[in-house]
Image: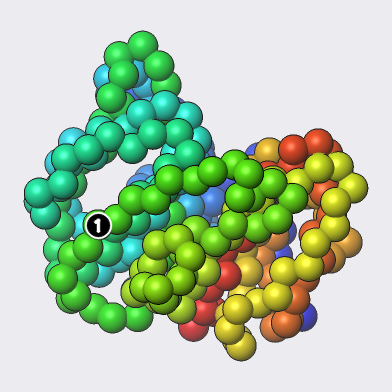
């Protein structure tokens, strides 16, 4: 078993006024040679976007981009012809593939947007770009895990071009649950979104993360009411 712990306060931070961002991995002007990626996870940004502001049209290619909405409404537009708003408790999935242009702007003038955006290296390059969106129901991830992402088009949630599985759970204080790694040689990057927990005996608080690999399963025990956790089960190479 190998593991690392990333404390919330050790993340990169950039406050641009309109954008308040925390970076788990090196991003833009923030570079930490020890935090470039975890397995196939390249970016994990925790963003707050001011009312009416956002990211203008810009390109991506050969990256799987997952946006988990925490609060507010985000106006999405892309070169595939999609134009829609993503709301709280929705997840946007985009395979940039051979290339896509998109913009993401706060749809409200007087309310912040809060979101996580995650970039995953794909296992296939230059595929046709793809867009998807799923809506979450809190009852489906209360005291259990709800799968958001997998490699299987016919499985629960959405899918991406990578042998990766994302799961979200919200647990009451004292609840203990085992998580089994989905594929041999995958590792897990577990982010505590809210509250506190212990994972295989390691205490973690809000926005702390544990990366762990060379294991078959891990045990998670909630140490607070409504502890919320995101599990990212990804290839290490």
Q: Is residue 226 left or right of residue 67?
A: right
Q: Looking at the image, is 110 positioned above or below residue 218?
A: above
Nearest the eye: 172 or 185? 172
Residue drawn at 14 percent across, 63 percent down = 99
Where residue 149 appears, as percent x and y from the top left, is: 46, 63
Q: Residue furthest bottom?
A: 184
Residue 21 appears at what percent x and percent y?
Answer: 46, 36
- Front residue of 166/142: it is 142
Relative depth, front residue between 29 and 160: 160
The residue at 36%/69% (across/down) is 160
**Total label count?**
1
Residue 210 visible in image: yes
Give the side of residue 1 with respect to residue 235, left or right.
right
The image position of residue 180, as x and y in percent, is 70, 75
Work out whether residue 61 can be spotted: no
235 versus 196 height, above or below = below
Q: Report the residue marked by disc 1.
A: 131
Q: Quadrant of residue 50?
A: top left
């Amino acid at each position: 078993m190998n593991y690392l712990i990333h404390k919330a306060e050790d993340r990169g931070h950039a406050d641009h006024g309109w954008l308040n961002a925390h970076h788990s991995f090196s991003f833009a002007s923030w570079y930490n040679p020890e935090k470039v990626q975890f397995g196939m996870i390249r970016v994990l940004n925790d963003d707050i976007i001011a009312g009416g502001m956002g990211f203008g049209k810009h390109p991506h290619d050969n990256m799987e981009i997952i946006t988990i909405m925490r609060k507010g409404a985000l106006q999405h537009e892309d070169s595939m012809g999609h134009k829609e708003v993503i709301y709280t408790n929705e997840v946007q999935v985009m395979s940039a593939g051979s290339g896509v242009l998109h913009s993401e702007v706060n749809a409200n003038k007087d309310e912040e947007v809060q979101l996580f955006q995650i970039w995953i290296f794909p296992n296939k390059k230059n595929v046709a770009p793809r867009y998807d969106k799923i809506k979450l129901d809190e009852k489906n991830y209360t005291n259990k895990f709800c799968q958001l992402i997998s490699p299987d088009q016919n499985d629960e949630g959405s899918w991406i071009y990578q042998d990766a599985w994302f799961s979200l759970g919200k647990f009451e204080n004292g609840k203990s649950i085992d998580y089994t790694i989905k594929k041999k040689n995958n590792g897990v990057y577990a982010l505590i979104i809210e509250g506190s927990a212990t994972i295989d005996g390691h205490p973690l608080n809000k926005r702390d993360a544990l990366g762990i690999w060379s294991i078959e399963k891990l045990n998670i025990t909630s140490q607070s009411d409504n502890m919320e956790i995101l599990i990212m089960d990804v290839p290490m190479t």
